[in-house]
Amino acid sequence: MNFPDTSAESATGAPVCSAKGCRADALWVLAWNNPKLHTPERRKTWLACGEHREHLAAFLGVRGFLKDVVPLAEWESSASGG
């Protein structure tokens, strides 16, 4: 399994998909947590383009880690208090 790169940005500074090798703009936030390592309220995030959203969600879902899938714009709006 190729693990996501969670720090990538495009040349314009826009977030890109976390799937290894993907440089597409991120459209989705996959919020997750590993209950063996994180407190219940903690949320880690992976970003996904339209092509990789289902694959990354399935990877997290099979392990019981996936908590939510939200459009990136909505996630950013809620994070900024808007």
Image (tube, rainbow, N blue to C red):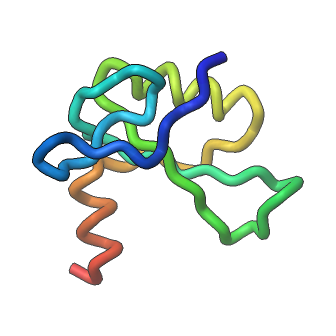
Seen as rendered, the residue at the extreme front is: 11
Where is the C terminus found, in terms of image quarters? bottom left
What is the quadrant of residue 2 in the picture?
top right
Q: Position of residue 21 (x, y in %)?
A: 40, 20
Side (left or right) of 54 relative to 39: left
Q: Position of residue 36 (x, y in %)?
A: 88, 54
Seen as rendered, the residue at the extreme left is: 12
Q: Is residue 70 above or below residue 82?
A: above
- Taking the spot 75% from the left edge, 39% from the top edge, the residue there is 64
Counting the numbered discs, the total is 0
Q: Is residue 32 above or below residue 23?
A: below
Where is the N terminus found, in terms of image quarters? top right
Side (left or right) of 45 relative to 49: right
Q: Position of residue 20 (x, y in %)?
A: 47, 24
Q: Is residue 7 above or below residue 25?
A: below
Q: Position of residue 25 (x, y in %)?
A: 22, 35
Seen as rendered, the residue at the extreme bottom is: 81
What is the quadrant of residue 39 in the picture?
bottom right
Side (left or right) of 21 relative to 1: left
- Taking the spot 24% from the left edge, 69% from the top edge, the residue there is 77
- Taking the spot 26% from the left edge, 59% from the top edge, the residue there is 74
- Taking the spot 52% from the left edge, 27% from the top edge, the residue there is 56
- Report the front residue among 3 and 71: 3
Side (left or right) of 23 relative to 5: left
- Report the front residue among 56 and 61: 56
